[in-house]
Amino acid sequence: GEDVEQSLFLSVREGDSSVINCTYTDSSSTYLYWYKQEPGAGLQLLTYIFSNMDMKQDQRLTVLLNKKDKHLSLRIADTQTGDSAIYFCAETPGGSYIPTFGRGTSLIVHP
Amino acid sequence: DSGVTQTPKHLITATGQRVTLRCSPRSGDLSVYWYQQSLDQGLQFLIQYYNGEERAKGNILERFSAQQFPDLHSELNLSSLELGDSALYFCASSARAGAITDTQYFGPGTRLTVL
């Protein structure tokens, strides 16, 4: 199976919260990341969490890490149409600084 | 705007041909990374250069090569192109050689179509 797995699509109504989930396989992962890719653009780092943390909050974004289950989530509060994009989860396997990316989750925000 | 520039934006070519993709890193960044994004493989790391030297290698085919020049721009050369090489090729740059906390900044990508 894939090292980093994400569901492909998520559709939410404007103003609702979005939760994008990710699972990874490498228990020695040190950092876990969320990137955003808007149409026609490259990946933009949104946030990252160190593996010894459970939660990180940054304005509308909340990252939750369950290390036991190797599960990472990104919650976007008050989702706006401008949040429509592809969101990539990534990890750095132990001993490496090169991220391994999931296939991305397309977030569609409708009015 | 990440500060990383890539040219060309789009490239259409035929099987068997050779192309060169170009990347200019953010001002001050010494590392350049190349990634391939395709529908079937997702985003795959190809190769990294730091200050002119190859630093890390990923899933890069032997038909592909890269280099980083003294002015720190980088080129990715793809030869004997096959239909399966059609993909988005991203360049990213970072300040240092490769620390986990070293943020990678991505360019807008070059879309390669092989017919």
Image (cartoon, coloured by chain):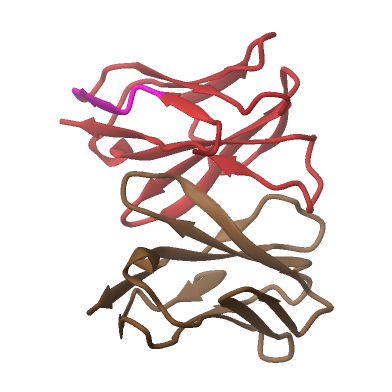
Describe residue A3's horizontal placement relative to residue B42 as left or right: right
Residue at 33% x, 57% y is B40
Q: Decide which of A89, B46 is in the foreground and name it.
A: A89
Chain A colour as displayed? brown
Asked whether residue B47 is drawn in magenta, I would say no
Q: Answer whether residue B63 is visible to the viewer in this image.
A: no
Asked whether residue B8 is drawn in magenta, I would say yes
B104 above or below A65?
A: above
Magenta residue span: B7-14
Chain B colour as displayed? red
Residue at 74% x, 65% y is A31
**x, y percent for residue A70:** 66, 84
Describe residue B42's horizontal placement relative to residue A9 as left or right: right
**x, y percent for residue A98:** 68, 50
Residue at 23% x, 36% y is B83
Count of numbered circles on the image: 0
> Which residue is most to the top?
B70
- Quarter holding the C terminus of chain B is top left
Q: Answer whether residue A43 is visible to the viewer in this image.
A: yes
